[in-house]
Every structure is written in structure tokens, then in C-alpha cells.
Image: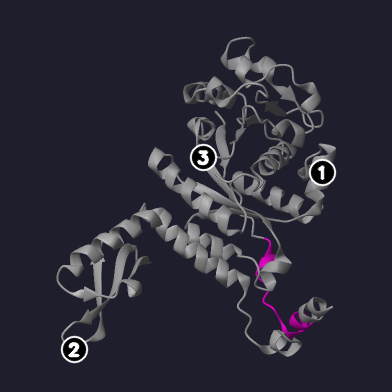
Amino acid sequence: MPGIAITFTSGKGGVGKTTVTANLAVALALLGRRVTAIDTDIGLRNLDIVMGMENRIIYDIVDVVEGRCHLYQALIRDKRFSSLHLLPASQTRDKTAVTPQDMVAICQELKKNNDFVLIDSPAGIELGFRNALAGADELVVVTTPEVAAVRSADRILGLIESIGKGSSQLIINRIKPSMVRRGDMLDTFDVIEFLAIELLGVVPEDEAILIATNQGIPLACEAKTPAGQAFHNIAYRLLGEEVPFLPIFEEPETLFTRIRRVLRLSY
Amino acid sequence: MNIFSRLFGKRTSSKEVAKQRLRLVLIHDRSGIPPELLHVIKNEIITVISKHVWVDREGIELNLSHEEGHTRLVADIPVASLRQGQATRQRGTSRR
């Protein structure tokens, strides 16, 4: 049975598409699935950094498209999980080096030998975004609970609809439970209400993410931190299991927490 | 803001401000009518209405709103009756 290609996109940069892609790739590989991650941000590659593979790149996606190597020669195998591979982007070329038709062909081939092909889209709505969408069976829009990010996500959803791609799901990234509790951050329900889209997962802000990126070992290799747990829950949902959403986001403010907040603010 | 108003008063949370701003910006984005175009439409409406009645240019408001799945262009145009010399407000709405 061929695998499924999922594109992660957001419109706005910096919301965590690459982190989400890398961690879900690892989480799915941990569950024994064959996964290939594709970096489509040609000219500004960074999925290789987050996955800790930057020193092992020999060929990239442009070499594949221009026939300098076979597709399978360009794949880098993860050192920890033998069922996880990366197809890196080129750092020296620009987005016009790959066409949507190329992406469709690459995804078709990779789906034959993988359960999941995860495509990391570049920011923006130009050719790179259209390339990332071309080969996708499913789409996941990544956003953060901020006005600009939600606005971009809404625009992206409009574009996806106009292109005629199927339904999309949403990941809300970098939510801060403490800020949600005191009314200074949009919560899960607010974002869903604005975007009217199915929720795939909610990932809390977690310092462990930066530490993991520093080390080039995606956080999902261990599920002990809040964000790591969230990625594993999303991976299970991608496999069709029903996992309840983490309950920490909707705690109402009590008089006690309000007193604590006010005292902290006044010092 | 003192400690009591923080504890018991109603602080307008920044989340509510964010929701309000997001609501407006999404109405514009989804309608495909940018604020610049709204400004052009407003000026043309003033020109047309001014042929017949005297309107208070400063008080005119033209906004998009979104209710029950329909985007509406809502114009609020204060009309100053020349005969009586006082302003009366008339509300005109047009469905897009």
C-alpha cells in the first residue's frame, strides 16, 4: 500500500513548520513507520539542521530534479532510526530550480517505499509554497496564537481552497498555558473559531525545543517534555488513533491564581 | 492601575483586543476589499449623495461587517437637512 504525503505550511515564517515536521517525522519513525521528510525551502534549507544531518548532505533535491543523481542517492538516513530519511533542499539555488510537476513525481516515488512523506513548506505564498503543495495528499497548517500568524493561516487556507486541494488540519504551536490563563493569549477555541478548521494538535511553548535544536536531536526522540508529548500525540492521531488533547490549556483563573498573578506583577 | 483594580476590576485582556483586531482584519481579507478600495467607494458615495442632499463628510462611516455567513457593506451617512439646519442620521445598508 502506498504511503501518504503530508505538507506542513503556514504562510508566515517563524511559527515552527520545520520543528513540527522534524519532530513528527521522528515520532512516526519511533512508532515503526517508514518516513521521509522533504525540505522544499530551496535556498534557505534548515530541516537538515533541526534533524542533525547537516554534515552528511552529498546530493540535494535540485540534483535529483536535474538528473545528477538518483532520488535514493540523495536521501540521508537518520543515525538513530533506520526507517527515517531526509531529502534536503539545495542551499545555493533558488525555488525556480524545482517545478510542481517535479514535486509530484518525487512524492509519487517516495510514497512507494514510505508510510509517510512529510513535506516542509517554505514561508510565503510563491512558487516554493506551490511546490510544497503539489505532491500533497493532506495538508497541515501550522500557526501560533498570534494575530499575524492566524491571519496568515486564514489566507493560506483560502489559497488551498482556491487551488482545489482537499481538507486541511491545524496545529497550534507555541501556546503558553500561563498566558492563556490570564487572558493574554488566544486559546485553542479562539483560533479554531476564527479558522473553522479541524484541530490536529496543540504544542505548548517549551524551552526544550531550542535545546534540542541546538543539539540537532529532535525533541520527539524522548517524550518526557510537554512539547515532546504533544508531538507524540499528534503522531498517534496521524495514525488514526483518538488521543485526547492535553488538558492544560483551558484551566480557568481562580481567585488564588489571580492573587498570585497580581502579586507577581506588582513587584 | 492599582492592586485592587487588578484584583477585582475588569482588565480588558489583551486577548480580547487581539480577537477584535483579528475579526476586522479577517473580514477585509476574506471579502477581497482592501481598506484603500473602501476609501475610494466612500468618496464616490459622497459625490453621488452630495448632488441631492447635504451630507456631513466628517461623520460618514463605511465598514464591512460579517454576520451569519454574509459580508455586508454598511454605510452610516449623517444627512444635514438644509431646510431645518440640523443633522439627522439615516442608516443605509447594502448587501454585497
Q: Which residues are magenta?
A: A246-259
Residue A239, image quadrant: top right
Per the image, is B87 magenta?
A: no
Q: Is residue A175 left or right of residue B74?
A: right
Residue type, numbered disc 2 = Gln
The residue pinned by badge 1 equals A212
Q: Residues within 10 Å of mark 3 (few under 14, many from 20)?
A: some
Per the image, is A251 magenta?
A: yes
Q: Is residue A112 above or below residue A188?
A: above
Which marked residue is nearer to the observer: mark 2 or mark 1? Answer: 2
The residue pinned by badge 2 equals B84
Q: Is residue A195 above or below residue B46?
A: above
At 47% from the left edge and 58% from the top edge, which residue is drawn?
Answer: A196
Q: Which mark is residue A138?
A: 3
In this orientation, which residue lies closer to the viewer: A40 or A1? A40
Residue A66, image quadrant: top right
Q: Are marks 1 and 3 in contact (CB under 8 Å)?
A: no
